[in-house]
Image (cartoon, rainbow, N blue to C red):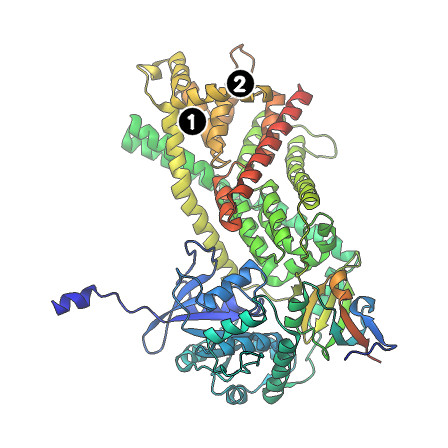
Amino acid sequence: MNELRDLKAAPPRPRHLALVGNPNVGKSSLFNALTGLRQKVANYPGVTVDAKIGEISLSDGRVWQVTDLPGISSLVARSPDEQIAVDALLGRIPTASPVDQVLVVIDAARPRRGFFLLSQVLELGLPTSICLNMSDEASVAGIEFDPAALRRLLGGVPVVATSAARGDGIDGLRASLLDAKAGAGICVSIPGLQGISAPSVARWVELRAAVGEAELAEQEAEARWAWVTQILTGCSRCGTPARATARERLDRYLLHPLLGPAAFVLVMGTLFQAVFRLADAPVEWIELAVARLGELATTVAGEGVFGRLLSEGIIGGVGSVLVFLPQILILFFFIGLLEDSGYMTRAAFLVDRPLRAIGLSGQSFIPLLSSFACAVPGILATRTIEDRRERTIATMVAPLMTCSARLPVYSILISTFIPERTVGWGIGIRGLLMLGLYGLGLLLSLIAAWVLNRFLSRSQALATVLELPPYRFPTWRAVGLQLWHRARQFLQRAGTVILALSALVWAMTNLPVLENAADSAAGRAAQIEQSWAGRLGHTIEPAIAPLGFDWRIGIGLCASLAAREVFVSTMAVVHATETGAEEDEATVGAAMRASVRRGGEPLYDLPTVLALLAFFAVALQCISTVAVVVRETRSWAQAALQFGGLSALAYLLAWVVHTLAS
Amino acid sequence: MHQPGSNTATLCDLRPGESASISGLERGVSFRVRLLELGFVPGGRLKVIRRAPLGCPVEVEISGSHYCLRREQAKAVWVERAS
């Protein structure tokens, strides 16, 4: 009986270590070095925590849980990102296990800010150890630390110097975790709180309640900075820098009043060029692999309903989405390089003033740039924006950026229906149209931001202070891991949501099965028209007829409400069913070109194609984006407003385009 | 406390390359807490590095870290020019 109870008892919870530090102190590289590949992005239900969680094995054989919290400058939270870190430290996230121990990561080359945060963390009374990271940069800057002296000054808190990017000092750090100790902090005295002086989380919470949750009294700040000076004088020496820093040499050009903006345009231009050029080859490989797999499925499963569901519906549908994985990854690869090298904040510095004219700021730059790959990570990145109003505007306009899900739709419509012609100087009309669609999205987002900026009530914000970090060589490991997370996220989506939708669309367009439908062209046409999807398309046809769309495009629009890219796979199914894919092996494009309206004229005439492009440029057809907006803003109203507004705008624009082009 | 003198100015008045010591922060501004956390406390030393192409924001160095302050923020930091 006893043994049975022992077996059933929950295993003891692993000790939970949290990494705390300012932004840009190399916390993530340290986390990667400690955990290796045993990590994942956490997502606690109820709260949108985007902290990374990993495991670490210690020298005594035990395994601990490690959380890499977002970078913070103090325990007085200002942005949602910081709130997450503070809440996790104070044990306010019910779904996360409480933090048992803290590792404070300090940039040894710029230590003062880190010690300010340390002064607060020590007051939580948790077992703590300190990591003086970037020790190589510190010695170049002429700063020397005496870890033993620091340990003495802090009452025995272990201190280890590391260089996480180079892997130096990691073993020592691992060992030091085992003798972490609650240190002697300063315990600022606040009138009314005297008498409770032992550091503890409860005391910290009381202290904050006494001065106001998001307040920091001037005397408190001064007391802390005085403490920082006192500690640093006792344990470090500042010499002269060994050589001019990369910052001085590079910023002279990259932030130059004229050369800076020119370099910015060049970098962004190169980025988008690279995304398109480099993606071509892998896209072809994926297309080829999907085609082979489809053939294989037909051979194995036969040409019955199940076999066709597998090859046409599932493999074809998921395959049409997989093809733009290369583009997403290449864009995120470059964004990762720019972020890790420190250029991204330079870009934010340059565009801050122009963006402020429309209620945004340099902080919105990274979220909006990421939205060119996908609005979901873009909207998640708005968490670093401190100003709530700016965050709202950035979230609202992010889906107007031309995300990679629009590309398959654009490219099939453009390559099928727009003639390959040049307008002079070797500029192709197709490329020009594609560029125009990017420009349209950007222009509309700027206008939308300007309008929102006019109508949203002004908050008295301006808390944003951007830091320009030193330039650093990105580590392949960090960029690679980031890409791996992105790829996995994307593949999970393709394997679940897109897979289910593809199967659903196939079923909707092929069921109920008509007798002898596959035998003749007329039978196949009847099949699609009589299917559930066909009936749905007919129902909405009157609403979309002014845009030049018929019931078949209506099917595509309904299906793409969930995800834009599904439009291509849906049209593949719709037109393949119509024309009989087995007979003429028609590509989607040829099948689309062949389809006609009831009167016999082509379905996809120029006004219709242009209207369709305009519609896709604006409409928010992406269930993941809507879901992430609801989760991030905690407001169904805002998500509904965004969806409704963008849909109405898309309809209006498509109508205008169709009318003008007819 | 803080006595305005001939050398008193705001951070906004400093030219690129000029150093100064902080004499105080304007009260009642929403970004005060953030500036205090970053080390903008009386007695702290800072240096203006450059301005962005359109004159704003201003890049300021304070104890080895570089921050971008907007005009409104820079105006709230009272400084004493290094003589």
Q: Position of residue A470 (x, y in %)?
A: 65, 68
* Residue holding disc 1: A573
Q: Residue at x 50, y 83 (%)?
A: A195
User: In the displayed structure, would residue A264 be above or below residue A139?
Assistant: above
User: In the displayed structure, would residue A267 be above or below residue A586?
Assistant: below
Pointer 1 indicates a residue of which chain? A
Q: Position of residue B19 (x, y in %)?
A: 79, 75
Pointer 2 indicates a residue of which chain? A
Q: Nearer the viewer, mark 2 or mark 1?
A: 2
Q: Position of residue A429 (x, y in %)?
A: 67, 31
Q: Indicate which disc, 2 or 1, sits on the residue closer to the N terminus.
A: 2
* Residue holding disc 2: A542
Furthest residue toward left: A1
Residue A277 vs residue A59: left or right?
right
Secondary structure at badge 2 equals helix
- Viewer-nearest residue: B46 or A96: A96
Q: Quadrant of the C terminus of chain A?
A: top right
User: In the displayed structure, would residue A92 be above or below residue A133?
Assistant: above
Q: Quadrant of the N terminus of chain A?
A: bottom left
- Viewer-nearest residue: A605 or A237: A237
Kind of residue at disc 2:
Pro
Q: Position of residue A289 (x, y in %)?
A: 41, 39
Give the class, few, some or many, for how many residues have Cα within 10 Å of label 1's Cα (few <14, many ≥20).
many
Kind of residue at disc 1:
Val
Q: Residue at x 54, y 74 (%)?
A: A207
Disc sitting over residue A208 in the figure: none
Secondary structure at badge 1 equals helix
Q: Is residue A291 visible?
A: no
Furthest residue toward top: A599
